[in-house]
Amino acid sequence: MDDLDDLYQEIILSHNKRPRNEGPLDPCDCQAEGYNPLCGDKIRVYVRAPGGCDGLIEAVSFTGEGCAISRASASIMTDAVKNRPRAEVDARIAEALHLLTSRDEPAGDLMTLGDLAALAGVRKFPPRVKCATLAWHTLESALKGEGSASTERE
Amino acid sequence: MAGQSASVDPRIGVESALFGIESQLFGIERRLIGLERRLIGMESRLFGMESRLIGMESGLFGMESRLIGMESRLIGMESGLIGMERRLIGMESGLIGMESGLSDMESGLFGMESGLFGMERRLIAVDGRLIEVPWQWLRGGGRLMLATRAPGQIAPEAPLRSPEDGLGSYPFPVSDDPIRADFPILSRTVGAGAGKPLAYLDNAATAQKPRSVIDAVTRFYEHENANIHRGVHYLSMHATDAYDGARERIARAIGAAHPAEVIFVRGTTEAINLVASSLGQRFEAGDEIVLTGMEHHANLVPWQLLAERRGLTLRFAAVTDSGEIDLDDFRSQFTARTRLAAFTQVSNALGTINPVAEMMAIARERGAYVLIDGAQGAAHGPVDVGALGADFYAFSGHKVVGPDGIGVLWGRRALLDSMPPYQGGGDMIERVTLTGSTFRSSPERFEAGTPNISGAIGLGAAFDYLARIGWETIEARERDLLDYATARLTEIEGLRILGPASTAAKVSVISFVMDSAHPHDIGTILDTEGVAIRAGHHCAQPLMERFRIAGTARASIAFYNNRDDIDRLIAGLHKVKRFFG
């Protein structure tokens, strides 16, 4: 029960119910589709970076169907990376993927992670980790101009 | 001349006479010298013979000493053998001693056992005070509760005290349901801490195994393990008999005309790949294969690969909104180029029972080969390949309470024998040279290499078990639970069941979606309640796309489930609604 509460904290449930930045971006400078073949979930991530995707990432949004974990993760992600230079965005992506997939306890200060920290509970549910990483992999693909991402192609 | 001689000086006569004597003597001397030389030659020959004799003598002496050496070694070996014999005799008597010791212990144990039995009887009888096990208290399952009547109240109608006042309650592996008791895993708990009792509702993914199947596999490895069709030794012959025997029992159970029609494969997936690779070699560019929109990826991807290799066209029969095959559309997919139709007997994702007889008739009219995917069908009812009338029927052992990694491809014998091999290797060949080989007939032709022997034996045991329970019982139990679960699920607001509305048109597989929660979230929350279901696309992505969903939650019921499992599913779904509502 405690684990379940960890997984579905208020933060996750609220992001799932009222996701931030859901819907396509127009204009949009780069985008990618992400796919989790294990469950069939699809997500599309849109990036606005008028100076190019190597420069300042002004905004990120997403569309798609998914479980509470994947939607909350996408919603948290869009807030966590907007208005940041590309290098910082890359660092956040690395940080998030490490938090979600590493066997180590979350490093140091969960507070600095903000809502991202809420995702740490997923580590106790190994079949669900890929639900949480999907949005981040998709953003990574969009920024690299790859067009598509899959949780089974890492 | 004589006159002349008379006048010669007499000394000359003497001289010549002496000369004559002298030359005679000289001749004698020469003969003597010759004799002497011969003597010397004889002497040296004798000397040579003598030294040869001496050589032979020393050779004989050497042989003699070698013989003496061998003799003493033989004597040594003889005494060694005698020593070993004595030790063996000693060991034998030791063993006899141990044996009698064991037999003493056995009778001692037997004595203790009868003593215990006597004590048990006495305990049961104690002074007429009753020890009763009320049946209804056992129904809770898992604990044996012993109750007594209050002292002095020994009449049968006197009220029973509760187990707490009586002799107490003891964990006891019994169930009020003898079928559930056959499945050891059903009595375990799952999840963190003490866990929750397992409510296993993922039977369409894989079925649980009864004790008799587990024992058959264990017995094989403990007592019978050897390779088959090779050894001339006892175990190999025994293993071969067990393997072939399993094939015969399965052939009988599914109504095959001959055991050679039953090919052991890894499962349905391999069975279909076998047909696609082997029979598929007959198909030519432009030929067509008819499938349906509800196929498992196992009955779709092998045909896609074949179509790519040989330039074939795949055509798909539409699925209606109620998750059933549109028969008119199925009929319209056949053309003069149709070579094969492959379809599932029962949808793994929705539970729909397809009208196989009608579909068979349509395909036969067009002269197409027919493969039926029986992965789900074989788990919910008896299979009769003769009555089905197809060319191929494929199913997996693990879905029919057998082991995993074993399955069956049934095919018509004449057709199988006309098909090229699927994989090459040992056991499938007749004669091999460096440049080519000839092949055995079915089933060996399609069973290259050492097969899954224990799996086949386990699958034979699974069919024996299902026959013992009886398909009537199995179907009645599943139908009761399907109707009960469908009624309870329908009561949940915001929950929608996909597939046929009537439970008569489906097996005990229930696929559903909820407004408030994604199938994955449903699955995770149910899991924390000990309820195991499947969430996702069920390896039928085209069918999911047909219904414009990413996936469903699927509860699939087997004959060893009970209403308590269903009640816990329903309770879990109410928890899902509380979380996400």
Image (cartoon, coloured by chain):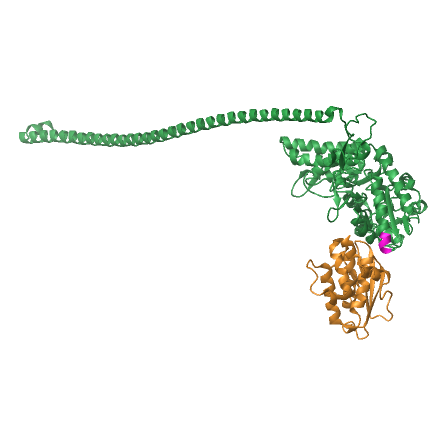
Q: Which quarter of the rendering shows the C terminus of chain B?
A: bottom right
> As drawn, is B531 to the left or to the right of B21?
right
A70 lies above or below B471: below
Q: Position of residue B122 (x, y in %)?
A: 70, 25
A70 lies above or below B320: below
Q: Quadrant of residue A152?
A: bottom right
Camera-side residue: B22 or B55?
B55
Q: Position of residue B181 (x, y in %)?
A: 77, 35
Camera-side residue: A34 or B444?
A34
Secondary structure mostly taken by the magenta-highlighted segment of the chain: helix
Q: Which quarter of the rendering shows the N terminus of chain B?
A: top left
Quick one: which residue is furthest to the front in this view?
Answer: B152
> What residue lies at 84% left-to-right and 55% top-to-bottom?
B579
Q: Quadrant of residue B234?
A: top right
Answer whether residue B353 is visible to the viewer in this image: no
B260 lies above or below A115: above
B24 lies above or below B270: above
Q: Position of residue B266 (x, y in %)?
A: 74, 42
Answer whether residue B34 is visible to the viewer in this image: yes
Chain whose colour in the figure is orange: A
Chain whose colour in the figure is green: B
> What residue lies at 75% left-to-right and 63% top-to-bottom?
A117
Quick one: which residue is furthest to the right in this view?
Answer: B328
The residue range painted magenta reads B576-580
> As drawn, is B356 to the left or to the right of A69?
right
